[in-house]
Structure formats: C-alpha cells, structure tokens
Amino acid sequence: MKKHDLRIERTRYMLKNALIDLLEEKNVESITINMLSEKAMINRVTFYSHYKDLTDMLEKLAIETMNTVRENLSAYEDDAHNWDNLINFLTHVQKESRLYKLILVSNKLPGFRNEVLNIIETQIYNGIEQSKNAKNKDIKLWYESSAIIGTIVCWLKEDMPYTPKYLVEKIAEIHFSKF
C-alpha cells in the first residue's frame, strides 16, 4: 500500500490550481512550463519530477477528473433512488466549479468536455437499458442527457445559485411530472 506524501499532494494541488488560473486567462497552447511553475510557486525541476510535460499533466488531470466523474455519477436509474448520485456529482462539480466551468462552459479543454458528456450519456443509457419501458429509448436518451447536461452548464454559468440538493429536487419534479 502506498503511503501518501502530503508534499506531493500539495505540489500537484498547487500545479492544478495554477493551470486553472492560467486557463482562465489564456488558451492551453499558450501556457508554458515556466508560466505554470511560476504561478504555482515551484521551480521547473519540481514540475518535471511530477510530469513529463504539459501534455502529460493534462492527461493525468483528465484521467483523475473522469474517474471522479464516474465515481460520483454511478449508474443512472430511472427512479427516486438515483437522485442521490446526481446530488453527489453536482456537489463535486460545485467544489471543482472553476475546473468544470473551463470544461463545460468555456470549452477550453474540449477533450475533457467530450469525455464528461460521454460519461453522463453512458450512465443515462445504462439506466434506460435497465428500464422496463422499452419504447423510444433513443429519444429518452437524447432528452435526458441534454436536459441534465444543459442544466449543469446553465447552473455553472449562473454561478450555481442553487444548492445541488435543491437543483436535483427540481430536476426530479420536472422529470416525474406529466407536462
């Protein structure tokens, strides 16, 4: 079992936040290791002890982010028990809102955006496949994935005016209403 080194965790945390700060100002192509190291208040050697290059850092950040999305948004089911998973996911998005604004709102990390959308769609698809209602599964997938993704994007754009729990309660009300 690996022992966690708090210095490593702190350095990676500082690098991640520095990257987010820089991405809020400029495109990923214009970010250099010098800029990133300076912003994180570390030296270049320290950066290279953690990552091969910026691409390696982005790939590791993508893997970490997608694993967290999967963990927080476990299999979608078309019932009331599922909503806790969405609350957990939105709580995670709220905690990491600066990163998710870059991914979903500004599209500064397009590969990340596509991965997050694919995970959400896959979870919804899996839930629909388990559903007893076999009619129009494709339309249901399009509708539900667009509604969830669109709601998350708007929630982020508006600086998250509602708690994750309240937002999910309203989504569930709309989902189960017969309008």
Image (tube, rainbow, N blue to C red):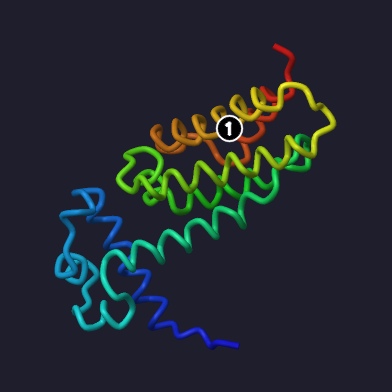
Instruction: Residue at 73% x, 42% y: name it.
Output: 82
- Given residues 16 and 158, the one toward you in this image is 16
Could you say which quadrant of the image residue 87 lies in? top right
Where is residue 151? Give x, y as percent: 51, 31
Q: Is residue 99 left or right of residue 123?
A: left
Could you say which quadrant of the image residue 19 lies in? bottom left
Check disc 1 and report the residue beneath it.
145
Where is residue 13? Give x, y as percent: 37, 69
From what the image shows, is residue 100 above or below residue 142? below
How dense is the environment of label 1, judged by Cα within 10 Å: few (below 14), some, or many (20 and up)? many
Instruction: Residue at 38% x, 49% y: name it.
Output: 111
Could you say which quadrant of the image residue 120 lies in? top right
Q: Quadrant of the C terminus?
A: top right
Q: Is residue 91 left or right of residue 24?
A: right
The amino acid sitting under disc 1 is Ser
Where is residue 165? Give x, y as percent: 63, 40
Instruction: Residue at 14% x, 70% y: name it.
Output: 34
**Label 1: which secondary element:** helix
